[in-house]
Amino acid sequence: MPLRYSRILLKLSGEVLAGGAPFGIDPERTRSLAEEIAEVHRAGVEIGIVIGGGNFFRGAAAAARYMDRVQADTIGMLATIINCLAMQDALEKQGVPTRVMTAIQMNQVAEPYIRRRALRHLEKGRIVLFGGGTSNPYFSTDSAGSLRALEIGAQVLAKATSVDGVYDKDPRQHADAVRFDRISYSEVLARNLAVMDASAVAMCRDNGLPIIVFNLTERGNIMRMSMGEPVGTLIGNAL
């Protein structure tokens, strides 16, 4: 089956790298995920990746406990860079060339984010991991994922989660929750569905970038999504 998307932005939560642990990075889980991403890359998909930092630090949560929000968000952005470096190591052990690019400059460990250079890396067959969020406080890694997806010309923003799509309410708390196969950006925003930050969804809506929300815990779903198989929920324009 031919590829549906030749360039994607994969948005991962930091908790994915923690595996079953409440904190940190699980090397085995990271290796397994790298294997799957490497398989998709070898199939010809150009991949950019944005990883959250929630397995180490959540800026908004810390700010709610009286920490200065700007300081807390900065710590959270640094956590995303740790995760990018861990994923880079795992991917390169799979023989995949990668580059970590950061919005916060730290030239001894990663390249500064420059859009044209990122595009060149993708064209040369390298996976690019975007760390440091947008470098601005008050913006989540969902917003960073939307921004980088648009900047690199990704055909889809693939949001990998622990559930199999977008529901009308939390399926982990409500047995009668209904899953959408497809839903419009406006309905996600109007219903205040907590699948992504509203600003990230609005950015995709305003620029016509489709979002696919799918279950990462089922192995092979990244490949299925790239081939256009009906995996998860498609967020796009109204039907």
Image: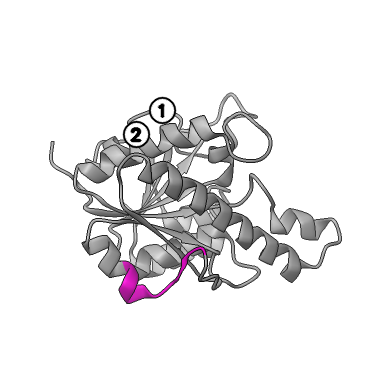
> Dot 2 lies on which element?
helix
Rendered position, 210 above or below 42: below
Image location of residue 66, percent across then percent down: 86, 61
User: Is residue 235 found left or right of 70 in the rendered image?
Assistant: left
Tell me the residue that label 1 is attached to: 218
User: Is residue 221 found left or right of 174 in the rendered image?
Assistant: left
For the residues labelled 2 and 1, the Cα–Cα distance comes to 6 Å
Colouring convention used in this rendered image of the protein: one colour
User: Is residue 229 found left or right of 33 in the rendered image?
Assistant: left
In front of the other: 52 or 184: 52
111 part of magenta stretch:
yes
Three-letter code for the amino acid on which mark 1 is drawn: Glu
User: Is residue 125 found left or right of 64 in the rendered image?
Assistant: left
Picture quadrant where residue 106 is located: bottom right
In front of the other: 81 or 228: 81
Question: As drawn, which residue projects farthest toward the front?
Answer: 108
Image location of residue 37, percent across then percent down: 34, 41
Identify the residue at image location x=13%, y=36%: 1
Image location of residue 78, percent across then percent down: 62, 61
Q: Residues within 10 Å of mark 2 (few under 14, many from 20)?
A: many
Give the magenta-colored segment's residue range: 109-118
Identify the residue at image location x=70%, y=58%: 59
Tell me the residue that label 2 is attached to: 221
Rendered position, 7 above or below 118: above
Which of the numbered marks, if any, corresponds to residue 102? none
Question: As drawn, which residue projects farthest toward the left?
Answer: 2
Q: Residues within 10 Å of mark 1 (few under 14, many from 20)?
A: few
195 part of magenta stretch:
no
In front of the other: 227 or 80: 80
Would you say the residues marked 2 and 1 are in contact, meaning their CB atoms lie under 8 Å apart?
Answer: yes
> Dot 1 lies on which element?
loop
